[in-house]
Amino acid sequence: MLVRTTRARSHAQDAQTAWTLLLNTPEQDRVKILKTSDGGANWVDQPGEFNIAGFAFASLHFFNANDGLGFGSPGTGDPTVDSLRIYRTSNGGNTWLRVPAASLPAPAAAEGQWVFGDNRCEARGDTLWFCTRAGRVWRTTDKGISWQAFTTGLLGSNNYPGLASVAFENHLRGIATSYAPSQAVRTEDGGETWTPSPSPGSPPAGDIEYVPGTTGTYFVNRGNLNASNTSSPYLITHDSGETWVSVNYSPALPVVEFLSPTVAFAGGNITSPAVGGIYEWNGVVGIHDGDDSADRISAFPNPSSGNIMLQLPHHLRAQRINVIDASGRTVLVRSAVHTVAPFALDLHSLRDGLYLLQVEFSDGTVLTERIAKN
């Protein structure tokens, strides 16, 4: 069995609880789901027919500690393996039930998913999208009970058919890509209709990642392992796919996950005991793109020795406030109450230092601001 994680942030509930997906290779015809409730010290094999050859799926996502989905299928090109299927759990994975095929849109022939990279799906609140090798994006708005499938117009090529990756910045706006040729399409209505984006060009757009806390910034990388651990071109858009900029970073990284404009992690080839492995981003990508003050967080005084006052955008309904330390660890979580007036956030429990303030809104928007405690 080959361990592979799909959207690791999505199915890590907290520091103690997480799920991981294992896919057998080279057949790709069955999977296992393992769950830990003690921070990874022990893992429990979860039951389901997906353990049986012929019932594999490709991706895993949990909306909360109880409600989760296993969905899609591997993209092998073999119709007997690539028959798309969806499973649901409402008790943290103790039991999984398959959504009846009669309740789903009719799958296209061999409508599988690529299993490289880590962004075959995206979730915002109770809504989840995933993309397929048939050039379609599937969507649920009720945590997997009902589904719709929408055609994007991207067909890919004979060697790399359909869509490789999809990312959404909120419930309405997103981008889907094909690997080769490297192309992109955009949506402004939650995935129901798609329009072409200027061709991203090199590299092949195997993985697209929205950068939380920005307006319209997406990061594109190959999404698969290169032959060597050398530099590789990446693509960035700051305007939701209107224009693309090619940048070069070293080393080549097949899997990238942004938690904010300043916090990201990636996995690369291991070429020696001292070279390769896990990398941490050290920079700022697209923070506060644009000059629309209505879409910004105001935090004052900043730095603060205790309470910090927050002013949030009036037109967005805040749901949750996260405070993230310099290592990317969430150290404070607070529910947010919709108000047009500034309100206080108590930082007394935190150590002195720099933090990232992250506010999640009901439409899926995530805004960030750097703050300091002294």
Image (cartoon, helix red, strand yellow):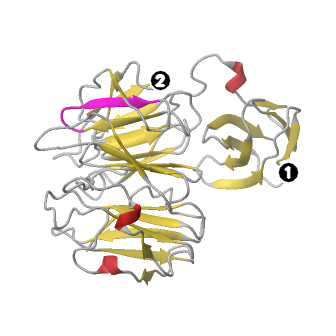
Residue 348 badge: 1
Q: Can residue 163 be found in the magenta stretch?
A: no
- Toward which corner of the image does residue 74 lie, by quadrant? bottom left
Estimate the x, y position of residue 328 in percent, counting from the top left: 58, 50
Q: Residue at x 19, y 69 (%)?
A: 25
Amino acid type of the residue tagged 2 in the rendering: His
70 left or right of 153 in image: right
The tag earlier along the polypeptide, 2 or 1, is: 2
Residue, x 65% and y 48% (percent of image)?
324
Q: Nearer the viewer, residue 222 or 77?
A: 77
Residue 305 can be seen in this image: no
Queried whether the magenta region covers residue 181, the answer comes back as yes
Is 322 placed left or right of 134 in the picture?
A: right
Q: Quadrant of the C terminus?
A: top right
Residue 354, position in %: x, y? 69, 41
Tell me the SS state at disc 1: loop
Give the residue drawn at x 21%, y 37%.
155
Q: Is residue 114 above or below residue 282?
A: below
- The reply to whether the C-beta atoms of the residues labelled 2 and 1 are less than 8 Å apart is no
Task: Kindly give the residue lying farthest to the left in the view shown.
Answer: 158
Q: Quadrant of residue 105?
A: bottom left
Q: Between label 2 and label 1, give the one nearer the viewer.
A: 2
The residues tagged by marks 2 and 1 sit, at their Cα atoms, a distance apart of 36 Å
Where disc 2 sits, the SS reads loop
Residue receiving disc 2:
238
Q: Nearer the viewer, residue 262 or 66?
A: 66
What segment is highlighted magenta in the picture?
179-187
Residue 63 at x, y = what percent? 56, 60
Foreground residue among 157 and 282: 157
For this view, does 19 lie left or right of residue 106?
right
